[in-house]
Image (cartoon, rainbow, N blue to C red):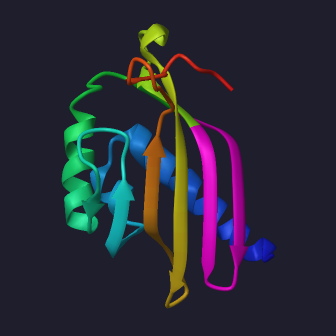
């Protein structure tokens, strides 16, 4: 365990969360490695590379055009050497309609290259009901 590395990753996550709330696409994708792989909860099965995931983020910003909720709960960060892993529950949706805010799960893998932490894998998901095949966005921690 490396508490300095974990602190660096936590700071990177906080900056990234603020970038999302600010809708600053350049800052959102800044920590992603060019060859990153993402499994997002919406649209495609996977996104290969920073450019593809940036286009996805741009599309996502169009879904919530007003003030947004983007809050993290239960953050856990582990780091050892040049690899790190974080996971948390994330509440997101329009700030003016709490009934539309949902919780999702996030897991992010990091690798330190040239002294900088980069996201190499990101996975967002929501549990689903196997009988109805519908996402369970009404669950709360």
Residue at image position (62%, 45%) is 88
Residue at image position (62%, 52%) is 87
Q: Which residues are magenta?
A: 71-89
Q: Work out whether residue 88 or residue 43 is closer to the camera in this orientation and state it.
A: 43
The single residue placed furthest to the bottom in the displayed view is 114
Q: Work out whether residue 56 or residue 21 is closer to the camera in this orientation and state it.
A: 56
* Residue 77: percent from left, percent from top: 70, 60
Residue 33, picture quadrant = bottom left
| Quadrant of the snapshot with the N terminus | bottom right
Based on the picture, tell me whether residue 100 belongs to the magenta stretch: no
Q: Is residue 39 left or right of residue 88?
A: left
Residue 134, picture quadrant = top left
* Residue 131: percent from left, percent from top: 44, 19
* Residue 111: percent from left, percent from top: 53, 78
Q: Work out whether residue 135 or residue 95 is closer to the camera in this orientation and state it.
A: 135
Numbered-mark total: 0
Q: Can you say whether 99 is above or below 48 in the image? A: above
Q: Can you say whether 104 is above or below 131 in the image? A: below
Q: Can you say whether 52 is above or below 21 in the image? A: below
Based on the picture, tell me whether residue 83 belongs to the magenta stretch: yes
| Quadrant of the snapshot with the C terminus | top right
Q: Is residue 42 left or right of residue 1?
A: left
Residue at image position (27%, 58%) is 47
Q: Can you say whether 21 is above or below 116 in the image? A: above
The single residue placed furthest to the front in the displayed view is 131
Q: Which secondary structure dominates the residues rendered in magenta? A: strand
Q: Is residue 83 left or right of residue 40?
A: right
Residue at image position (55%, 87%) is 115
């Amino acid at each position: 365990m490396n508490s300095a590395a974990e602190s660096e990753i936590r700071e990177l996550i906080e900056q990234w969360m603020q970038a999302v709330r600010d809708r600053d696409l350049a800052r959102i994708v800044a920590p992603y490695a060019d060859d990153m792989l993402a499994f997002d909860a919406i649209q495609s099965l996977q996104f290969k590379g920073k450019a593809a995931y940036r286009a996805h983020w741009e599309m996502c910003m169009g879904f919530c055009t007003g003030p947004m909720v983007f809050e993290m709960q239960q953050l856990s960060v582990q780091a050892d050497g040049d690899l790190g892993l974080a996971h948390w529950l994330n509440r997101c949706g329009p700030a003016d309609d709490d009934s539309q805010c949902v919780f999702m799960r996030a897991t992010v893998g990091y690798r330190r290259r040239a002294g900088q932490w980069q996201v190499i894998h990101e996975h967002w998901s929501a549990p689903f009901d196997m009988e109805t095949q519908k996402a369970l966005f009404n669950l709360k921690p």
